[in-house]
Amino acid sequence: MAVGLGSVWSLLLTALVIHLAAPLFGKSESTAVGDAVSQQSIQCEKYDHMCDPSRQHCPTVENCTGLSELPQQCYASWMNNSDGIKFVFKGCWVGDSCVGQKECVLKSNRASVKFCCCEGMFCNRHVNYSVSHVTTTTPSTPTVIRKQGGAQLIRTVMYSIVPLFGFAFIIVVVFWMWRRHQRSYNSHEPLPTVDPAIPTTPSETALYPLQLIELRARGRFGSVWKAQLWENYVAVKIFPLQDKHSWSVEQEIYNLAHMKHDNILNFIAVEKRGDNLNVELWLITEFHELGSLADYLKGNTVTWTEMCKMAESMALGLAYLHDEIPAGKGREAKPAVAHRDFKSKNVLIKSDLSACIADFGLALKFEPGKSPGETHGLVGTRRYMAPEILEGAICFNRDAFLRIDMYACGLVLWEIMTRCSALKAEEYQLPFEEEIGLHPTLEQMQDLVVVRKVRPAIKDHWLLHPGLSLLVSTVEECWDQDAEARLSAGCVQARIAQLARSVNISTSTSNLIQPSQIVVVPSGELPPKDAPSL
Ligand code: ADE
């Protein structure tokens, strides 16, 4: 009886404390009871340094409801300048990196753009500059540098002390109840589990506040994740430590002068994550929702116009990569770059269905007068290897490497053609999948491509269409057995551009090209086969 009365009394006290503390947290009675409920209705202060209130509406509040299933939090980012700090962004933050953190406390002091996140209504209104959980050798700036009025100070003290006492009281009461009832207390809540498949993103070494959202691809060199950085999606390619060389090569290629191009994947940054024992190497690039060309073709057919756009933009990207830009007045030189692993998985499709080239972990740059470094021949993906690589030839020079890319480019163009709805589109298959399946050995590839000189099938009905037959001849000139007879990427791009212009298809009729819909220019007007850059 005494125990029962005690329990009721302590429950009443607990309810009273929660009731008193709730308004101090800015929560209603019901939301103070469970965080899960409060997370659904959180609001954060909103700020965007790019928004000009004299020209547009700049919201100051963001409603986080419905952004994600993940816990909802607020964040702020800012830069230090001579006058203090300048905010960059504020808003809702989706994730669980700041669960339980009521104040927006600086996460890492290493990046020029500072970042904090926190949980609770408008908790990003003020930021706390002191570094949280970070051991740093640089002296940290004092805690909370904002100015506070007297009333606000009292409120802040109340906010911290009253809930503290309340919680201490609750803990004592709960402990007391637990001690009294421990003999009959049998239920055990399972601990929350950590999904080992999801990489951790320790903030100690992080420069960028990245949130990994979804695994998008697994490749030879680690995995590619869709991630969130500030208010944008980005792609994060995670290399294990043993693939450090590919990570270094890839960033070196992206950092060459003049590597910004519409048809080359846009590079953002690199960083090292984790501690000494468990280092991961991250490479951050622009994210393209449609994924790789291989993925896209697996799930979609393409119209004649889409095919021309994809093929032309891909060839343009490859031509740009292959081209050398000489140094000029105040302009740095761009060396010619060979990709060395060109394939439909390494071409990404942008939202307008143009293509961009990615994955430069095996690339080689050719700076005039300098050795290109390691030029070991047998690299790349077997299925896409040119006959001269499969034959084991060595001592390739710059042009030989560019021609090897062009052989693979021919195979990728064939993949796009097989999915063109202007023809009878076939099921998507990789090049040579029909001939040797999904896991060809080196010996099988050598027999097929070098000895028997087989190439992917060109169906008879493709040649019935004058426009497509021109594309077929371009593809065949890319994968010629004689490397020196192959087209350059610049020439392929010019041919496809002309083909797209000259083959006039009425979109009001069916997708299938009728011979009457095709206007073909005389072949003499096609750009010459001579390679501009080879
Ligand atoms: N797969 C590999 N890289 C990618 C990227 N940058 N965007 C989307 N999917 C990808």
Image: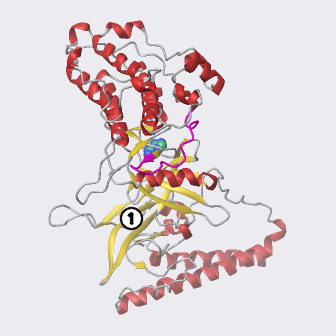
Give the side of residue 1 with respect to residue 225, left or right.
Answer: right
Question: x, y (%) of residue 308?
Answer: 30, 26
Helix, strand or loop: magenta stretch = loop
For residue 18, which quarter of the picture?
bottom right
For residue 434, which quarter of the picture?
top right
Residue 54 visible (yes or no): yes
- Mark 1 and ligand 1: say if the CB distance to the nearest ligand atom is below 8 Å: no
Residue 353 visible (yes or no): no
- Residue drawn at x 18%, y 61% as measured from the top left: 56
Q: Range of the magenta residues?
A: 365-381
User: Quick one: 221 or 64, which is closer to the camera?
Assistant: 221
Q: Is residue 205 magenta?
A: no
For the C terminus, the quadrant is top left
Q: Report the residue that reaches farthest toward the bottom.
A: 150
- Residue drawn at x 60%, y 22% as measured from the top left: 446
Give the side of residue 222 with respect to residue 121, left or right.
Answer: right
Question: x, y (%) of residue 451?
Answer: 58, 16
Q: Report the residue that reaches farthest toward the left.
A: 54
Instruction: Name the residue that disc number 1 marks.
Output: 43
User: Quick one: 104 or 347, which is closer to the camera?
Assistant: 347
Question: x, y (%) of residue 437?
Answer: 60, 21
Amino acid at pointer 1: Gln
- Residue drawn at x 72%, y 60% as measured from the top left: 189
**Colour scheme shown:** secondary structure
User: Quick one: 364 or 142, which is closer to the camera?
Assistant: 364
The answer to whether 138 is drawn above or below residue 262 in the figure is: below
Question: x, y (%) of residue 494?
Answer: 26, 29
Tag 1 secondary structure: strand
The answer to whether 36 is drawn above or below residue 309 in the figure is: below
